[in-house]
Image: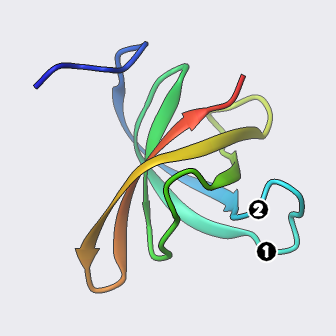
Amino acid sequence: MLEKRIHTRDDLMEIVRYAPSPHTSDTVLKGLIKDYSNSGLCLMAHQALEEGQEIIVNSIIMPYSKKAVVRWHQHLGNAAYKIGLEFKR
C-alpha cells in the first residue's frame, strides 16, 4: 500500500479532548490518540465522526488546540471508532 502521509506517525497512547464542531466548544468529548505526527493523528473514540467533518482537538502533547479534518473512519464494533485526522494549516 502506498503511504500518503506527509510525516511519519509515531505510536502513542494519550487521552485527547475534542469538540465535534470547530465553531463551539460547548460539547467536549474524550478519546485516545493511537498515533501522532505534525500533520495529523489517529483517534480512537466512542462517537462516529463523518469524513470531511472539522473538529478541534486538545491534548497535553500539543501546545494549543488544533483544528483537524476527518479524512477516514472505521467502525470497530461496540461503539468504537478509529478515525484518521489531518491538522488544518
Q: Quadrant of residue 21?
A: bottom right
Determine which residue is flagged by label 1: 27
Q: Residue at x 36, y 83 (%)?
A: 79
User: Crowding at label 1, few (<14), some or many (≥20) Cα neighbours within 10 Å?
Assistant: few
* Quadrant into which the N terminus falls: top left
Mark 2 belongs to which amino acid? Ser
Task: Identify the colour scheme used.
Answer: rainbow
Which one is nearer the viewer's eye here, 6 or 42? 6
Left or right of residue 35, residue 24 in this image: right
Q: Give me the disc on residue 21.
A: 2
Secondary element at tag 1 = loop
Q: Quadrant of residue 5?
A: top left
Is the residue under label 2 in contact with that under label 1 (CB below 8 Å)? yes
* Quadrant into which the C terminus falls: top right
Which one is nearer the viewer's eye here, 67 or 61? 67
Extreme front residue here?
A: 52
| 36 vs 20: above or below | above
Extreme left residue here?
A: 1
Image coordinates for residue 76, horizontal then vertical, percent? 24, 71
Secondary element at tag 2 = loop
| 19 vs 71: above or below | below
Image coordinates for residue 66, horizontal then vertical, percent? 74, 37
